[in-house]
Image: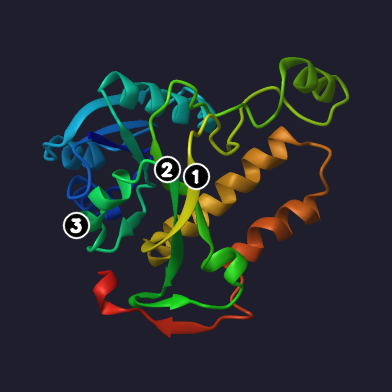
Amino acid sequence: MKIVGCMQVGGDCSWILDSSLTNMSEIVDEIVLVGGSVSDDSKKIIERCNKVVETNFYPDNQSRIEWDDMNSLLLMAKNHGADWILFMDADETFEPRFKTTIRDYINNPDVGMYKFRRYWLWNTMEQYRVDRPEKFSSLAYNSYLVRATPTLHFPNPAGSLWKRLIKHLQGKEKLKPYFGREPITGIMGDILESDVVLLHHAALNWEQFVKNQMWYSMLLAKRQPLDPEKDIVNQFYSILDESTLELKPINKDWL
């Protein structure tokens, strides 16, 4: 069975992309990529990866609509004959044993999706956060292995056109741009939690990490103009907050 890897690579993720793309290429048969404002350094890294079979890089002036990007990846994977699809973010890596065990996973006829435990590396590659496990050591929201079916789809998280139009007329939400996405639908089979570990590297590049949180805050404020500024600030500061910080050494087998 054929496994196709899907990854969003918007912006400058070149500081981690060589590691994450190499990691993915050791697990899957082919890779498809989508993103906007992709840096030249990122494109050079992508060109060196012989597992990449298709890319969809849109212009810098085109707004990012994440659920559209995910459906684009989904269509690309299906067009390349995927039996299974592995979704993974550009700032993540799977532990090495996954490349030898993934075939056991996809050979289970009863399963439609596998989820993975994601740990946030913090300050250095040698430690991860164990405080606030609901955020920093939870099941990955963006990265999972799913069986390809004709019904797979990422729905618009803002709801139907009528629902979005009503919210827009009420001044609660903008129709565009939009970021974020709802969970994938159309899964056929059981959904299992794997013990394979996924490492999240975003906080190791602190400057880019902070900029990303500021960007998310701006997008949310533009989309939901009636939300109190304090709520938006607190929502995104909570990710940077170290008041409860507790770290634990990683298992070296995860690297």
Q: Residue at x 22, y 63 (%)?
A: 96
Q: Quadrant of the N terminus?
A: top left
**Nearer-the-camera pick, 58 or 207:** 58
- The Cα atoms of the two marked residues, 2 and 1, are separated by 6 Å
**Chain-order first, disc 1 or disc 3:** 3
Is residue 65 visible to the viewer in this orientation of the structure? no
- The Cα atoms of the two marked residues, 2 and 3, are separated by 20 Å
**Residue 183 at x, y percent in the picture:** 57, 39
> Label 3 neighbourhood size at 10 Å, few (<14), some (14-19), many (20+)?
few
* Circle 2: residue type: Asp
**Residue 55 at x, y percent in the picture:** 27, 26
Quadrant hosting residue 162 = top right
Q: Secondary structure at mark 1?
A: strand
Residue tagged 3: 100
Residue 221 vertical placement versus 246 (above, below) = above
Quadrant hosting residue 8 = top left
Discs 1/3, front = 1
- The Cα atoms of the two marked residues, 1 and 3, are separated by 22 Å
In this image, 156 relative to 196: left or right?
A: right
Q: Are marks 2 and 1 in contact (CB under 8 Å)?
A: yes
Q: Quadrant of the C terminus?
A: bottom left
**Residue 227 at x, y percent in the picture:** 81, 43
Q: Residue at x 25, y 22 (%)?
A: 80
Q: Residue at x 72, y 20 (%)?
A: 160
Residue tagged 2: 110
**Chain-order first, disc 2 or disc 1:** 2
**Nearer-the-camera pick, 102 or 227:** 102
